[in-house]
Amino acid sequence: MVKEKVLVIGASGQIGVELTLALRRIYGNANVVASDLREENQLLKGTGPYVSMDVMNKEMLHVQVIRQGITQIYLLAAILSATGEKNPNLAWHLNMQSLLNVLDIAREEKIHKVYWPSSIAVFGPTSPKNDCPQRTIIEPTTVYGISKYAGEFWCNYYFQRYGVDVRSLRYPGLISYKSAPGGGTTDYAVEIYHEALEEKQYTCFLKEDTYLPMMYMPDAIRATIELMESPVEKVSVRTSYNLSALSFSPKEIAAEIKTHIPEFSISYAPDYRQQIADSWPASIDDSVARSDWGWKPEFDLARMTKDMLDNLK
Ligand code: NAD
Ligand code: AKB
């Protein structure tokens, strides 16, 4: 078996912490190098190597890849949808240049595999609202969505032209308790659990009937690892796979929380994020991921809510 050495870029973020820990369980602690611009997340401390690094510094990234003998790269550094609308130039610059830096180095150093996440944010108001298919009209209206859409085609280009084995998932909104979300439109579905336990009240920045595609983090981590471990002939999509688990509204998640915390109440004060949410599908058809490499989610809203509240308590 080839010995793999993995680099995770953006390891201190919402996905990065849990993905790094999962990869360390598979490849061994010493073989997964965590890196980020910000300081090492508390949960990562003492579990394996950490390098402080700006992915925009291509030279430094290249040196690290050679010095550490890296064979796989997971690129998670990005600016998400809500923060992106506040600084569109920065979001475009970081989201695009980080990917191009990684793809170039992967090509040059013959990196075995690259992982780069896309998002349901690639879809726009002209895409089908329900069960949005893998291949459909894609006209994103946020800078984040535009950067994900362009990124998907760069991944496809590097695969077709240079043979870089880059794989990608269009994650829905991710819900987790270990590390905080980083400026997305779906973040309300994490905040609501914290506020329900601490304040018994939550003011939601989306309207009560805003349905969005969502997923619990353990499912997202498993999907990522299953895709990355699939034999190459099973990976037919080289832009990014639709991935689905849940679709619910603020009203529905609040009702589920109330079954555990009866005194919990929710109110609504929609802000600029409503427009972003309204531009996205309510649910996603992930049948291609299911048939290509056997994807199947495990958590529904009830099971996720129980697990979130048990762990946050
Ligand atoms: P996050 O914001 O929580 O984490 C991103 C990490 O990248 C942060 O720790 C940040 O410090 C780091 N970073 C930022 N700029 C950097 C730089 N120049 N150099 C090195 N590190 C830098 O984001 P996340 O939620 O963990 O998302 C990870 C990826 O998954 C992103 O590409 C995001 O678009 C995608 N995604 C996330 C979700 C979700 O719900 N969390 C959904 C769809 C797609
Ligand atoms: C966001 O809301 O920006 C992210 C995403 C769906 O990509 N959670």
Image (cartoon, rainbow, N blue to C red):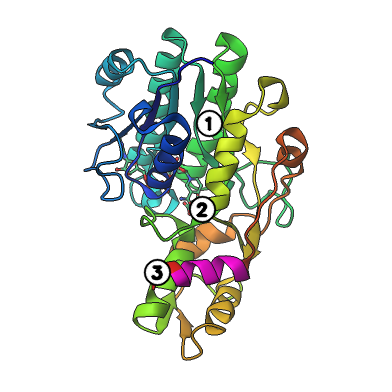
Amino acid type at circle 3 is Leu
- State which quadrant residue 216 falls in: bottom right
**Residue 53 visible, this angle:** yes
Between the residue at mark 2 and the residue at mark 3, the CA separation in whole angstroms equals 14 Å
Nearest to N terminus: mark 2 or mark 3? 2
Residue 15 badge: none
- State which quadrant residue 204 falls in: bottom left
Picture residue at 58% right of the left edge, 47% below the top: 120
Quadrant assignment for the N terminus: top right
Q: Secondary structure at mark 3?
A: helix
Q: Is residue 80 above or below residue 185?
A: above
For label 3, the residue is: 312
Instruction: Please provide percent x and percent y for residue 19.
Output: 44, 42
The answer to whether residue 309 is magenta is yes
Q: Secondary structure at mark 1?
A: helix
Amino acid type at circle 2 is Met
Q: Are marks 3 and 1 in contact (CB under 8 Å)?
A: no
Q: Which residues are magenta?
A: 302-310
Q: Main secondary structure of the magenta part?
A: helix
Q: Nearer the viewer, residue 28 or 240?
A: 28
Image side of residue 108 versus residue 224, left or right: left
Instruction: Please provide percent x and percent y for residue 130.
Output: 73, 57
For label 2, the residue is: 217
Q: In terms of image quarters, where does ligand 1 lie?
A: top left
Give the crowd class for mark 3: few <14, some 14-19, many >=20 residues within 10 Å.
Answer: few
For label 1, the residue is: 150
Q: Is residue 254 above or below residue 249?
A: below
Picture residue at 46% right of the left edge, 91% below the top: 263
Give the crowd class for mark 2: few <14, some 14-19, many >=20 residues within 10 Å.
Answer: many
Q: Is mark 3 within 8 Å of ligand 1?
A: no
Image side of residue 39 versus residue 269, left or right: left
**Residue 172 visible, this angle:** no
